[in-house]
Amino acid sequence: MTGFDAFSFGARGSFAGVPRRTIDDVGDAGAVIIGAPFDWGTTSRPGARFGPKAIRDADYLDLNGSRPHLDTGIDPLATLSVVDVGDIHVVPGYMEESIERIRSAVTSIARAGAVPIVLGGDHTITFPDAGGVADVIGHGDIALIHFDAHADTADTHYGMLHGHGTPMRRLIESGAIPGHRFVQIGLRGYWPPPDVVEWMRDQDMKSYFMSEITERGLDVVVDDAVQHAANEAKGVFVSVDIDVVDPGSAPGTGTPEPGGITPRQLLDTVRRLGRELNIVGADIVEVSPAYDTADVTALLANRVVLELLNGMAQRSLGV
Ligand code: MN
Ligand code: MN
């Protein structure tokens, strides 16, 4: 159900040249890279099906499976025995079948005791990504830290259950991740409407708007987020919608919203989360290369993966 070279828009090589594996044989990998080339849940500019390929390709270093970090001196790919299983065989245009296949792939990785790192894909996939991890660890037992300009808590997607504006609602309603275990960072702009924001408050979701981040500083907000997410949860799923970053620095995305955080802030924050929390899964979504300039968005997404893995490697080594 996964692999390389399945699609014209899919993976050719592995992330940073880490070993390729099949989904049924991830060995003793600590973290598994997997692509979800899916964009039939977008509402505006499509193209995120090319995201996993672009994120893997956004690299100017040799594809030798090694990425020692300048600051930490740690090679997270070796420390965590990271492997890549290629892309999930989603079915273009078929929403529910694709969601099922994503959930089954993510579940299989989590069952093997590894941390799935899913390259998207539009944000629809976080329902099966985080839901699949919750299926293994326990419904209600994991927290979700969600970076995004948008809350993605709409009731429906043009009357339908699934789309990139509804995954957080579906996770809450299905019981996989309750509202009080949600932390959202970076919300801004003009969506969702007030009734949805009220629903979010009723669910006891913690949502940090950009205005609060600007006032209090991101570090202080992340202090809160870490404390809240760690609170009695068995683990944390991190979902990064690349549009949390200002579109000036991340133009390659479908629904850009001006006034976001900087690439530096995002990179430092995900590394910190990896170091301070028990990460049980992650996804990086909404990279749409057709709107990118000089690969800056794909490069950023590639480094978001590496920084998160770095934090996780630091945690595993106790440094
Ligand atoms: Mn989103
Ligand atoms: Mn978004």
Image (tube, rainbow, N blue to C red):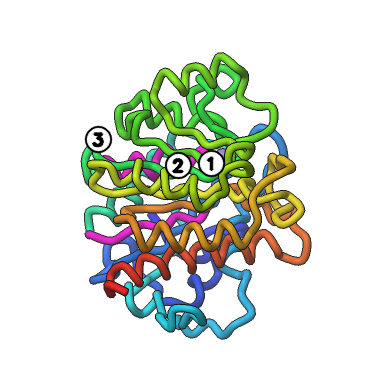
Q: Earlier in the sequence, mark 3 or mark 2?
A: 2
Give the structural element (helix, strand or loop) at label 3.
Answer: loop
Which residue was labeled with disc 3?
A: 139
- The magenta segment is 113-135
Does 118 lie within the magenta span?
A: yes
Alpha carbon distance from label 2 to label 1:
6 Å
- Residue at figure coordinates x 60%, y 50% from the top left: 242
Q: Are marks 3 and 2 in contact (CB under 8 Å)?
A: no
Total labels: the figure holds 3
Q: Is mark 1 within 8 Å of ligand 1?
A: yes
Alpha carbon distance from label 3 to label 1:
20 Å
Please state which amino acid type lies under the numbered disc 2: Thr
Q: Is residue 25 left or right of residue 307?
A: left
Give the structural element (helix, strand or loop) at label 2.
Answer: helix
Residue closer to the observer: 17 or 151: 151
Which residue was labeled with disc 1?
A: 123
**Quadrant of the drawing holding the N terminus:** bottom left
Residue 176 in sight: yes
In this view, 95 is above or below 88 = above
Residue 101 in sight: no
**Percent coordinates x, y for residue 7 in the rendering:** 56, 58
Rendering quarter of residue 113? bottom left
- Residue at figure coordinates x 70%, y 49% from the top left: 246
In this view, 31 is above or below 139 = below
In this view, 210 is above or below 195 = below
Please state which amino acid type lies under the numbered disc 1: His
Label drawn at residue 126: 2
Q: Is mark 3 within 8 Å of ligand 1?
A: no
